[in-house]
């Protein structure tokens, strides 16, 4: 299973790359607005220097020509850019046109298996169901991931299911069990996955016992 970081913060991306678990990055206008300070293009170029995995850059135009112009612009920034296109009638057409041009897309804002099926048929290589936002409205977001994985497998579709809007470590475990090909996570959730109170306690106990043994040895040598 691939792990993407859902952020535009290059420091977080560098940290996770050093941990050896980074397979790619997803960004969106909200994540860019959180870091700001530099142009979206320059941040995307920097991210693409850190990882050779797919880096999603989202279009904001709402009509076909504007979306295509933004998509081609992003795709020219680095070879590993994947263009994020929101699910809509216009979005499907843009995905299909970009597929013909050989530009990879990530269909975002997917909230049903049917939307994901259409995005895959139009030519999106990544399908992003938003788990947390479905949970927010009292629906089972992970069921959308399960259904979409099954559909992709049933018909051997040339697309990967990317579980997005992951809010906590349990979402990650459930996405992995559902067979999601990718999950994109906030940095905080990745940290939460690493830590466990018994692990932290165990490390502290081993350290304390080690110091005790060394002190006893030093005392024996000194006497
Ligand atoms: O990958 C999509 C993600 O950024 C949305 O997350 O928590 O705003 O629903 P959230």
Image (tube, rainbow, N blue to C red):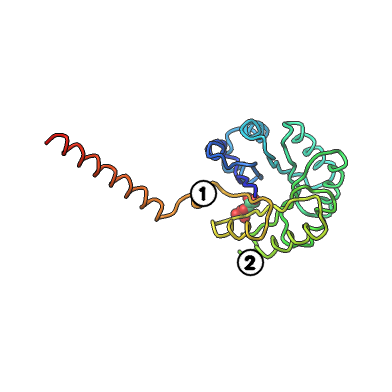
Say left or right for 213 vs 145.
left
Q: Position of residue 209 (x, y in %)?
A: 28, 47
x 68%, y 65%: residue: 143
Say left or right for 47 vs 213.
right
Give the farthest residue toward the left.
Answer: 223
**Along the line of sight, which residue is nearer the eye, 60 or 145?**
145
Name above or below for residue 45 compared with residue 202: above
x 60%, y 60%: residue: 174
User: What residue is disc 1 on?
Assistant: 188
x 25%, y 43%: residue: 213
Instruction: Specify few, some or many for label 2: CA neighbours under 10 Å numbering under 14, 14-19, or 20 or more.
Output: few
Q: Position of residue 121 (x, y in %)?
A: 85, 53
**Along the line of sight, which residue is nearer the eye, 155 or 5?**
155
User: What residue is disc 2 on?
Assistant: 137
Name above or below for residue 143 compared with residue 103: below
Spatial separation of the CA atoms under disc 2 and disc 1: 23 Å
Mark 2 or 1: in front is: 1
Q: Is residue 115 visible?
A: no
Between disc 2 and disc 1, whose residue precedes?
2
**Secondary-structure class at tag 2:** loop
Q: Quadrant of the C terminus?
A: top left
Instruction: Specify few, some or many for label 1: CA neighbours under 10 Å numbering under 14, 14-19, or 20 or more.
Output: few
**Secondary-structure class at tag 1:** helix
């Amino acid at each position: 299973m691939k792990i993407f970081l859902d952020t535009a913060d290059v420091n977080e991306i560098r940290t996770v790359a050093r941990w050896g678990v980074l397979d790619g990055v997803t960004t969106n206008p909200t994540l860019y607005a959180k870091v700001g300070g530099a142009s979206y293009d320059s941040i995307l170029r920097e991210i693409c220097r850190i990882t050779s995995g797919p880096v999603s850059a989202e279009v904001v135009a709402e009509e076909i020509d504007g979306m295509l112009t933004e998509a081609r612009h992003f795709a020219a920034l680095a070879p590993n850019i994947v263009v994020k296109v929101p699910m809509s009638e216009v979005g499907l057409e843009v995905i299909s046109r970009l597929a013909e041009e050989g530009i990879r897309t990530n269909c975002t804002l997917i909230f049903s298996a049917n939307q994901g099926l259409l995005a895959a048929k139009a030519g999106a290589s990544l399908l992003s169901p938003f788990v947390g936002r479905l949970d927010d409205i009292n629906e089972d977001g992970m069921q959308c991931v399960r259904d979409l994985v099954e559909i992709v497998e049933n018909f051997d579709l040339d697309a990967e299911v990317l579980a997005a809007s992951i809010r906590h470590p349990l979402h990650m475990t459930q996405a992995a069990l559902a067979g999601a090909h990718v999950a994109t996570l906030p940095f905080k959730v990745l940290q939460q996955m690493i830590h466990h109170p018994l692990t932290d306690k165990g490390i502290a106990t081993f350290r304390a016992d080690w110091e005790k043994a060394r002190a006893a040895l030093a005392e024996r040598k000194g006497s």
